[in-house]
Amino acid sequence: MKIPPVKGTRDFYPPDMAIRNFIVDGWKKVSMRNGFEEYDGPIFEYLKMYQIKSGDEIVEQLFSLTDRGGRELALRPEITPTLARMVNQQINALPKPIKWFSVPRLLRAERPQKGRLREFFQWNIDIIGEDNPRADAEVIFTTIDYLRKVGLTPQDIKIKISSRKLLAAALRAFGIDADDLESLYVLLDKKPKMPPNKFEVLLKDKVGDKKIVNKILDFMAVDDVLDIPKINNFLEDDSEELNEVFVSLDQMKVEDYCVFDASIVRGLAYYTGVVFEVHDVAGELRAIGGGGRYDNLLRDFGGPAISATGMGMGDCVLEILLREKGLLEEKLPATKLDYFVACAANLSTHYDMNLVSKIRQKGFSAAFSYKTDVVRKYEEGDLSKQLKEAAALNARNCIIVGYDKPLVLTKLIIRDMATGDQERVDEDDFLSRLDNE
Amino acid sequence: MKIPPVKGTRDFYPPDMAIRNFIVDGWKKVSMRNGFEEYDGPIFEYLKMYQIKSGDEIVEQLFSLTDRGGRELALRPEITPTLARMVNQQINALPKPIKWFSVPRLLRAERPQKGRLREFFQWNIDIIGEDNPRADAEVIFTTIDYLRKVGLTPQDIKIKISSRKLLAAALRAFGIDADDLESLYVLLDKKPKMPPNKFEVLLKDKVGDKKIVNKILDFMAVDDVLDIPKINNFLEDDSEELNEVFVSLDQMKVEDYCVFDASIVRGLAYYTGVVFEVHDVAGELRAIGGGGRYDNLLRDFGGPAISATGMGMGDCVLEILLREKGLLEEKLPATKLDYFVACAANLSTHYDMNLVSKIRQKGFSAAFSYKTDVVRKYEEGDLSKQLKEAAALNARNCIIVGYDKPLVLTKLIIRDMATGDQERVDEDDFLSRLDNE
């Protein structure tokens, strides 16, 4: 009976798993060196957890299930609600600021397409309990620290940064009612995905007044945060926070990656301050990642009003970009077996297994042939077949063992598989050499 | 709105995550040094995947869901069906033997209790395409290689090894019909979980003949594979394979962990040859892991008849045992921040962020205070508060920066937080020192 995999999911064969590990291990390593601690939650939560703040798109794409106890559950489409629940549960015990990261497996019932799958992995970093703009800068720096580490340059990617708070102040200053802000954000967020004239028509329909439309368009075209007061000098105070973020990023020497872009809004309903997205410079892919400040989320999940800022980055678009730039080939570590132990003669005492077990215990990878035993399939001392096995396993070295005369072991022959160089060495000397490597 | 976590799942706060990472990273490392490559599949498969061979208990405990396309899916309760599907899909392209491992997140709707949760992680290793008993020995050795590495001794755990093939031959030799074997296995598997006299009564009910009952009891009491021919000398051939496994384990110097135990049967329907379980010597916990040879599984999933052998070990019982033996405290690496950068004076140029970014890029973990900026909450040069922050973050070193006179930076003061020792060093010297660490 042959059953296919489920649409929109991936099978990770060892070469695919090596790529996933390369991406995920990099996320973990960079998170830790930036002072974040790892957490994780369950693969599912109560369905209603995602109906609070996740936004309509995510709610429509939930994989939901009912367990035998009649509980309505959903597979996690994002980890932020779990984060809010976990922090709220221990809010008094946890020292602030909380700097946490996670690399959850997430599920969304989307239509599978380039860079979007139903099952994916997402890097999340969050700083909770700190309203200082330096925390926003820290989140953005950590994002860049990873992208730079895997070889992406300012010629490949840009972090487009703006602020919901600034945008709200600007729109209010232009004459938009406070009640109309949320629905206007939804439209502004779609600007990059449509032709400019179509956007203008829709904006005109929404706003009505042509003068306001032009002010909004002028504002969205600003590409330096210091130019904002030129649009409206009342906005100087509102842009100070964002300015502090840019000054910090400058000091952290990642300014080449960062641009102010007033058209960045972010779709999710919960952002309240600085927002940003990571885009490929060529503009051919979806956003690689994004995030921002969300000051009300913990309260919405039954906790206190505590400020927070964070970032999420999926593995799918990132992998496409790394592949396009040739960085997977360049950076992916080669998987090599350290030692393959071959038998030059019939070693009925299983000397190969014995040596392999000692090498492994010293932390090196080692293998032997399954075909050289009492039920042997290789002829006695058929070294060439074993050397082929060693080569197929991508072994760095092959160790050849055998008897000189009955029951007297020779020295080990250690063969460098790349150069073909061989040396003879006593087993004890070889093993103590491993201790020093 | 406060929503609880779902019953039977775990929240991994950073200290819990450190334990999970300790366990999982060890599994990965040991798998690799034993020559296994990592794979993974989706969190769900078509429901019918698990109705083929997973056994009644697992099928009853499935978390099932129907997606928007009407597909009947189930969250994976084990990864072996996924492994069979993946191998079958690429059976001709994959070099044999296939040596793969995985550490899947699994879901079972069990009644949560000590060592059993609805969501857990399981180490799986499998060798496919090799019927040599040395492959079974390799799987058992790899299992022990991990358990030994985390500090468990033969005084703590034992691997109880038997063979379904030998058991079948013995039962047939004693006069049991071939058709009755499967149902008899189910009863024999429950032997350790009931008082001896209750087991005898049930066995009598099942088998009928008192003489056969006694032969079965004698066979199940054998504790050395070499003693099997004493029970019935026709069994000598049938025990040769198992004997070869023990000889191999002896050569790999893990014989102290291994015992023959004819009462090991394994619940799952798909085992066909060598079977084994890992138990705590005190006998207080459920099995820590188990596995064996399954020669028909790939065929049952629409592939060719290829021999395979493997092992599974969950994280829950293992963690209980490691905790009881004090090994978590002993082995868990301390999470320490390498450097905390503190400001001795008002550094309006964000010098602390600048230094931190350089330290991180060299691969070391570093942090600074969010409270020492333009919107500062600390008084200028309030070092004691920053040193407290450094201590709270468990920093190894604190670097103190400041001006000697306006705009002239002093040397860095590097303070060892454990000893209190301090030294003064130029930034360049400090940074180049990091390159050599």
Image (spheres, coloured by chain):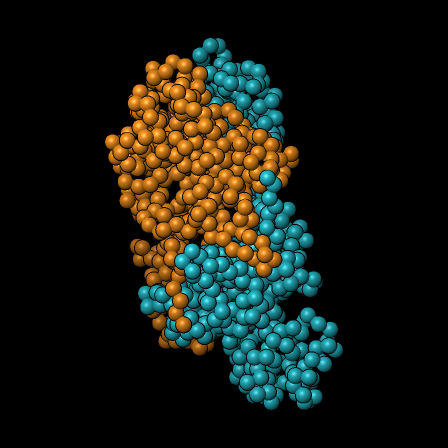
Chain colours: A cyan, B orange
Of residues B255 and B158, which is closer to you in this image?
A: B158
Residue lying furthest top: A406
In the rendered image, which quarter is residue B212 located in? top left
Q: Residue at x 45, y 62 (%)?
A: A72
Of residues B232 and B321, which is closer to you in this image?
A: B232
Q: Residue at x 32, y 65 (%)?
A: A93
Q: Is residue A127 above or below residue A407?
A: below
Give the side of residue B96 with respect to residue B156, left or right. right
Q: Is residue B356 above or below residue A373?
A: below
Q: Residue at x 35, y 68 (%)?
A: A91
Q: Residue at x 49, y 32 (%)?
A: B294
Q: Horizontal and vertical percent for residue A402?
A: 50, 17
Task: Report the number of discs.
Answer: 0
| Residue B256 in sight here | no
Of residues B18 and B280, which is closer to you in this image?
A: B280
Q: Horizontal and vertical percent for residue B116?
A: 36, 48
Q: Is residue A341 above or below residue A114?
A: above
In the rendered image, which quarter is residue A98 located in? bottom left
Give the side of residue A328 with respect to residue B354, left or right. right
Pick the quarter of the image with the N terminus of chain B. Answer: bottom left
Q: Is residue B243 above or below residue A250?
A: above
Q: Horizontal and vertical percent for residue B242?
A: 42, 23
Of residues A145 and B287, which is closer to you in this image?
A: B287
Q: Horizontal and vertical percent for residue B66?
A: 54, 56
| Residue B179 in sight here | yes
In the rendered image, which quarter is residue B201 located in? top left
